[in-house]
Image (tube, helix red, strand yellow):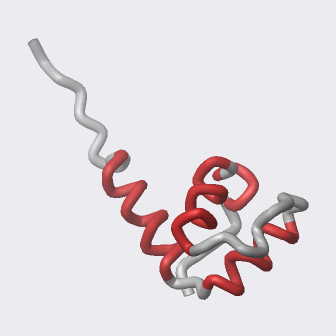
């Protein structure tokens, strides 16, 4: 049986790319981006928590690119 392989999409690479993009921003920049999207309660969050908020709302942060 043949297995279909999609070389242009790899879930692991997608996740790692997203993490790399998020790590290129400072904590203050991440907070500013999240607050701009009207998500409340982020002022005392640490980097890992901010990453989780962004990953949970990926469609709202698709504009973020690596700096």
Q: Quadrant of the C terminus?
A: bottom right
Q: Quadrant of residue 33?
A: bottom right
Q: Position of residue 11 (x, y in %)?
A: 36, 46
Give the side of residue 54 with respect to residue 7, left or right: right
Q: Position of residue 18 (x, y in %)?
A: 48, 63
Asked whether 59 or 30 is in front, the reply is 30
Q: Residue at x 64, y 52 (%)?
A: 58
Give the side of residue 7 with respect to residue 57, left or right: left
Q: Quadrant of the N terminus?
A: top left
The relative height of residue 36 versus residue 53 in the rendered view (above or below) is: below
Q: Residue at x 60, y 87 (%)?
A: 26
The relative height of residue 16 versus residue 4 in the rendered view (above or below) is: below
Asked whether 21 or 47 is in front, the reply is 47
Q: Position of residue 60 (x, y in %)?
A: 75, 55
- How many discs mark residues in the rendered view? 0
Q: Quadrant of residue 36?
A: bottom right
Q: Residue at x 51, y 74 (%)?
A: 21
Q: Position of residue 56 (x, y in %)?
A: 63, 48
């Amino acid at each position: 049986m043949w297995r279909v392989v999609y070389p242009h999409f790899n879930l692991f690479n997608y996740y790692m790319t997203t993490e790399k993009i998020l790590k290129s921003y400072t904590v203050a920049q991440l907070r500013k981006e999240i607050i701009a999207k009207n998500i409340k309660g982020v002022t005392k969050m640490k980097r890992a928590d901010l990453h989780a908020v962004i990953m949970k709302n990926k469609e709202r942060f698709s504009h973020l690119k690596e700096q």
